[in-house]
Image (spheres, rainbow, N blue to C red):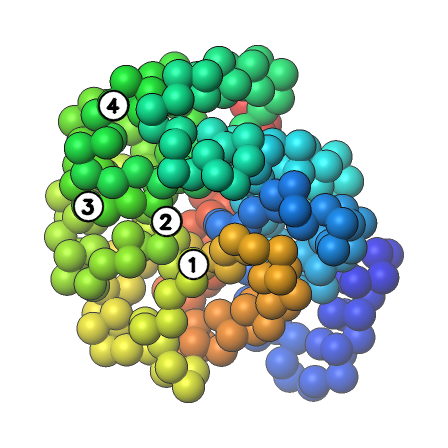
Amino acid sequence: MHPAILLVAVLLASAPGRAAEVLPIFDAHLHYSHDAWDPVPPERAVAILRQAGLRRAMISSSDDEGTQKLHALAPDLVIPVLRPYRKRTDVSTWVRDESVLTYLAERLAKYRYAAIGEFHVYGADADLPVVRGMVRMAKDRGLFLHLHGDAEAVERVFRQDPEARILWAHSGFDRPDNVRAMLERHPRLWCDLAFRTDHASGGRVDPVWRALFLAHPGRFMVGTDTFVPERWHYIVEHASWSRAWLEDLPREVAERIAWRNGDALFGDALRRD
């Protein structure tokens, strides 16, 4: 048994009556970019994921080699997601850099992925040729798009491809009433809750967010967002924090947000014929 798994098992066994209640976590938003490799070597990164009790982890990186390092070590755990970034600074330039499409095509020809993203795009930039080309690539391969942007960008992508499947990063950093409106308008839109804390505090779920989770239990997933290397040391704590506030929801809803939605959407993503 992997040492980290053994540690989790020991901790659960030391808390009588609690083991059956511990939620698995499907983390829908992690990065392992080039500047994380030295401070958190691949073997240590995988150990952290297992220590956190993650069922699966969607991982992207700048560049893609970080994702491939972790997937090679833990294909049972890591779900690869392809970022259009080769380095961190691409975040501000990629939408006008046509070489991005060549890079994506090369990686898609070499490896298998569940999604393209996480990528940053806002407003009318979603209609730029590079973004349109990426949306077509996702459509041709049946891949999700993990989009970090505003509601306008989401709307524009859906106009390009009404059958697109979009995972909206950070729930768009938007108000819950706006998130609700988007979910009700777009049945092929899902939201990750990465790096949001306003929906829960002190183990209690905000009433407005609670109503939204109960209305759309199949449309949310949790995520940590290791956008800088230091965030890797927060993954275990974040998983525990997520379990704490999810306990405030009905068990069925908590399980869907914690892991069942992720499993249903991405669990078989890399086992397609």
- Numbered badge on residue 169: 2
State which mark lies toward you, 2 or 4: 4
Q: Amino acid at mark 2?
A: Ala
Image position of 197 (left or right of 44): left
Looking at the image, do the residues carrying marks 3 and 1 touch, with CB atoms under 8 Å apart? no
Front-most of residues 142 and 238: 238
The first of marks 3 and 1 along the sequence is 3
Q: In this rendering, is residue 129 above or below 27?
A: above
Which numbered disc flags the more N-terminal residue, 1 or 4? 4
Residue 255 lies, in percent from the top left, at 46, 62
Picture residue at 28% right of the left edge, 52% below the top? 172
Seen in the picture, residue 174 relative to 189 is either above or below; the reply is: below
Q: CA distance from mark 2 to mark 3?
A: 11 Å
The residue at which mark 3 appears reads as: 151
Q: Are marks 2 and 1 in contact (CB under 8 Å)?
A: yes
Badge 1: residue crowd in 10 Å (few <14, some 14–19, many ≥20): many
Mark sitting earlier along the chain (2/3): 3
Residue sitting at 56 percent across and 67 percent down? Answer: 239
N-terminal label among 2 and 4: 4
Residue at (39, 22) in percent of width and height:
97
